[in-house]
Amino acid sequence: MIQVMICDDQEVVCQGLNAILGTADKLEVSGIANNGQEALELLQKKCADVVLMDLKMPVMNGIHATKEIKEKHPQVKVLILTTYDADAWLFDAIRNGADGYLLKDTSREMLIQSIEEIAEGKTPVDSKVAGKLFSQLSKHALPGESTLGKDLAEREREILALIAQGMTNAEIAHALFLSEGTVRNYVSSILEKLGVEDRTQAAVLALRFGLVD
């Protein structure tokens, strides 16, 4: 059973999410917090595999709360669930450790699926903001310092940059004059070296740690 904590300052939202998650066989709500500080306090008392985190809240907003949670409880996944799709919110959330980013108009089915995926180590990103993520990466990586990705070969970094632009294997193969099979092998190697499950997660890490030029 996946233990989920809800963090939102709107009572009606909390009630709605509690009702929705209560219909999912694999999910159980372990606590409800009305701001980031309450979420941190609850995590000292109750277990949570995933925190559904709103962004704009009193006392402690979701960005600061995400950073604190990832520092103090690194095993806990933070899934942003917000109405804000502005670049600043998205990139700040990723920089501070968010494991996924959804908008509140997402469907019940997608919400439940995303929580299950994030608990498995995947990185769900709402299609409405994914374009902004890839667009930013196609221009330049945001600054960051990390040894992550130090084992990537020059060709792998080149392919990672194209992944970050949202290109498919076929498009990468065409651009680099490689076979699709060769590209698939490079992509598999990139994911393994970065320790991620999918292309979106690789792109998020590239943004978070500045792995591409």
Image (spheres, rainbow, N blue to C red):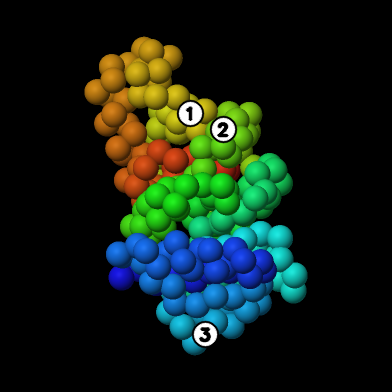
Instruction: Examine the rendering and report whether any part of residue 154 can be seen.
Output: no
Q: Mark 2 belongs to which amino acid?
A: Gly
Which type of secondary structure does the marked residue at label 3 adopt?
loop
As shown in the figure, which amino acid type bears the numbered disc 3? Gln
Looking at the image, which residue sits at the far right? 58
In the image, residue 98 above or below residue 154: below
Left or right, 92 with reference to 182: right
| Residue that badge 2 annotates | 131
- Could you tell me which residue is drawn at 52 percent across and 85 percent down? 44
- Residues at marks 1 and 2 touching, judged by CB atoms closer than 8 Å: yes
The residue that appears at 28% across and 17% down in the rendered structure is 179
**Looking at the image, residue 188 lies above or below residue 74:** above
Distance, label 2 to label 3, CA atoms, is 36 Å
- Image-based side of 100 in relation to 64, left or right: left
Kindly report the distance in space between the C-alpha atoms of the residues bearing marks 3 and 1: 39 Å
The residue identified by callout 3 is 44
Circle 1 or circle 2, nearest the eye? 2
Q: Residue at x 32, y 25 (%)?
A: 183
Label 2: element kind: helix
